[in-house]
Image (tube, rainbow, N blue to C red):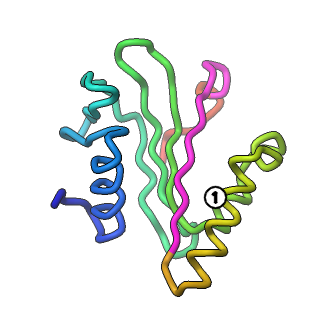
Amino acid sequence: MLTGASLDEQCLLNSVKQTGLAQFKQRSAKAIVIELAGLDTEFDLISLNEFTSERKLMSVLVRDRRSGQLFVYAKGAESQIMNRLSAESRASPLSEQVAREIVRFGSAGLRTLVFAMRQLDTSEFESIDLSD
């Protein structure tokens, strides 16, 4: 069993590992290493917004060391994540499928979390206030 800040994180990490999609390798104060498609991918950790009961989600801003691409990853309550999707993402078949699965899992009495990712361009990144 992998370790994580919460049982939810441990379950997510183990599920992703079991599917073969990715595997968490290590984390330091400034970097994260994830195995993707059999290759270690290193990310610089730019900002981490911890889960709060107000936000009902957590997010992390990272830069892929190899490509320089910037990404925001978030996980949290489906209401918080789904409400933040772009109009294009909301209209996608994947979003509709996720919404159906949320209802199905919720109807079975299971807790649900949603995971999302967005790539940022340089101008978006430069407009973010990281002083907090």
Q: Amino acid at mark 1?
A: Ile
Region of the chain picked out in magenta, as a range: 112-124
Instruction: State which quadrant residue 30 falls in.
Output: top left
Question: What's the residue at 62%, 69% (across, down)?
Answer: 102
Front residue (pair 94, 124): 94
Residue 113 located within the stretch drawn in magenta: yes
Q: Position of residue 73 (x, y in %)?
A: 50, 43
Q: Position of residue 12 (x, y in %)?
A: 36, 58
Q: Position of residue 16 (x, y in %)?
A: 35, 49
**13 relative to 46 in the view: left or right:** left
Q: Is residue 28 visible?
A: no
Question: What's the residue at 65%, 64% (across, down)?
Answer: 80
Front residue (pair 26, 112): 112
Q: Position of residue 77 (x, y in %)?
A: 57, 68
Question: What's the residue at 72%, 49% (across, down)?
Answer: 85
Quadrant position of the N terminus in the picture: bottom left
Q: Is residue 101 above or below residue 16?
A: below
Question: What's the residue at 61%, 84% (across, down)?
Answer: 107
**33 relative to 112 in the view: left or right:** left
Instruction: State which quadrant residue 40 falls in.
Output: top left
Q: Is residue 84 above or below residue 100?
A: above
Residue lying furthest top? 67
**91 relative to 108 in the view: left or right:** right
Q: Which residue is mark 1?
A: 81
Q: Is residue 66 visible?
A: yes
